[in-house]
Image (cartoon, grey):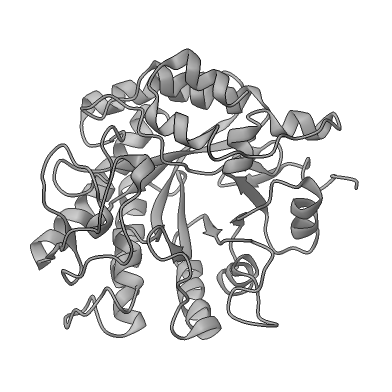
């Protein structure tokens, strides 16, 4: 197949994406215990830039010194030391003409490792379904979180803003608000996790409120020129089969409201980006975001096959594609596709497990070659 769409450029908020390939955010747990980025992380992200990806979205970065951290050895943007450490990573990526976007994350009740507290918080004090991820250091069911007070909500909103400001100072080209995969903002969106009776719970309008407020607060702080996106999903780390209660109608409301905000793009993730997301003959999640949000869309979910990704772009269901496991197996995937080279299959046992557990730089780099 001709991959003309994949290797065309596009522009979002004066940022030129040299092709349509983006590295998806992937939890790494390879930062310093105090949340500083390090040389291991620099080499990890630089490989993707060398490999031809037009942009890289960071792993989820925690935003404060209280409840936001989700995993031990997760990186932060909660203090100036974090900011300074990220500069080395961002500079390394920019040296190869790739963009770097910081994904800002609050784990909420889905946290399974935090250097600042042993407690967790969530909209209504309801633990997530399922169990913690063993390959990221967790075990057993999630603890029951504390239900958030209005003061907690205000603190979280401010933490997103302050970390977005730090991302600008660190040199990132933009920020992505993590509103997916069962973390805090997705917990507000999820009916069975949000039983609040105030302005942040109940109706879908109320459940989306905190997300829209954070978007506008960030925009006010970073100005009109800085790129701000969001990641949205139905699926969750601990509930991979979850669907929105009102299906496509709920998708229409969520994406249309996001489209009316000051966002610059919407990043959606699903088990398979090409499969109908709301039942037979329905739209894919990417198509729903595109149709209802009317913003540039990044699609994620089993798009490592370049022919499959090209078709999605040609059908105007998305503007860019983000790759996770395919990028882990092929850090130079765009360059390989350009040259007509075969791609390696992702092997969970050989790639993800060792990367999650092993801190040795050379071994980590060899694993993904």
On the image, which quarter does residue 174 sit in?
Answer: top left
Left/right of residue 349 with respect to residue 1 in the rendered view? left
Task: Give me the residue at 33% from left, 49% from top.
Answer: 105
Locate residue 39, reporting x and y percent: 40, 16
**Quadrant showing the C terminus:** top right
Task: Give me the residue at 36% from left, 58% from top.
Answer: 215
On the image, which quarter does residue 331 sit in?
Answer: top right
Q: How many marks?
A: 0
Locate residue 49, reporting x and y percent: 60, 26
**Looking at this view, is 37 or 303 the one in front?**
303
Q: Is residue 84 above or below residue 318?
A: above
Locate residue 338, reporting x and y percent: 82, 32
**Looking at this view, is 165 or 199 the one in front?**
199
On the image, which quarter does residue 154 sit in?
Answer: bottom left
Task: Give me the residue at 24% from left, 44% from top.
Answer: 69
Would you say residue 93 is visible in this rendering? no
Locate residue 10, reporting x and y percent: 69, 45
Task: Give me the residue at 90% from left, 46% from top.
Answer: 2
Q: Is residue 172 above or below residue 122?
A: above
**Looking at this view, is 302 or 188 the one in front?**
302
Would you say residue 235 is visible in this rendering? yes
Left/right of residue 343 with respect to residue 138 in the rendered view? right
Left/right of residue 124 with respect to residue 273 in the rendered view? left
Q: Residue furthest top?
A: 362
């Amino acid at each position: 197949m001709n991959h003309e769409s994949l290797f065309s450029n596009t522009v979002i908020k004066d940022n030129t994406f040299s092709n349509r390939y983006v590295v998806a955010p992937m939890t790494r747990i390879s930062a310093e215990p105090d949340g500083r980025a390090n040389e291991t992380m620099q080499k990890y992200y630089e490989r993707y830039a060398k490999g031809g990806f037009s942009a890289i979205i960071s792993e989820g970065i925690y935003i404060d010194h209280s409840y936001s951290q989700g995993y031990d050895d997760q990186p932060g943007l909660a203090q100036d030391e974090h900011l300074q450490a990220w500069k080395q990573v961002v500079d390394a990526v920019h040296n190869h003409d790739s963009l770097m976007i910081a994904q800002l994350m609050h784990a909420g009740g889905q946290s399974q490792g935090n250097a600042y507290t042993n407690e967790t918080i969530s909209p209504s004090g309801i633990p997530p379904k399922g169990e913690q991820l063993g390959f990221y250091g967790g075990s057993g069911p999630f603890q029951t979180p504390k239900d958030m007070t209005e003061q907690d909500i205000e603190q979280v909103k401010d933490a997103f803003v302050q970390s977005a400001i730090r991302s600008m100072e660190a040199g990132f080209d933009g920020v992505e608000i993590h509103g997916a995969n069962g973390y805090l903002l997705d917990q507000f969106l999820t009916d069975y996790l949000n039983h609040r009776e105030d302005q942040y719970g109940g109706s879908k309008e109320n459940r989306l409120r905190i997300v829209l407020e954070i978007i506008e607060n960030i925009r006010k702080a970073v100005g009109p020129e800085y790129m701000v996106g969001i990641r949205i999903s139905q699926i969750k780390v601990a509930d991979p089969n979850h669907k929105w209660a009102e299906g496509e109608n709920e998708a229409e409301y969520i994406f249309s409201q996001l489209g009316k905000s000051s966002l610059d793009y919407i990043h959606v993730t699903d088990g398979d980006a090409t499969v109908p997301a709301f039942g037979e003959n329905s739209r894919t999640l990417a198509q729903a975001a595109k149709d209802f949000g009317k913003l540039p869309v990044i699609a994620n979910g089993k798009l490592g096959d370049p022919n499959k990704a090209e078709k999605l772009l040609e059908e105007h269901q998305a503007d860019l594609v983000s790759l996770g496991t395919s990028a882990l197996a092929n850090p130079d995937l765009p360059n390989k596709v350009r040259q007509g080279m075969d791609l390696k299959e992702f092997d969970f046992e050989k790639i993800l497990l060792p990367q999650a557990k092993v801190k040795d730089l050379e071994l980590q780099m060899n694993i993904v070659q």
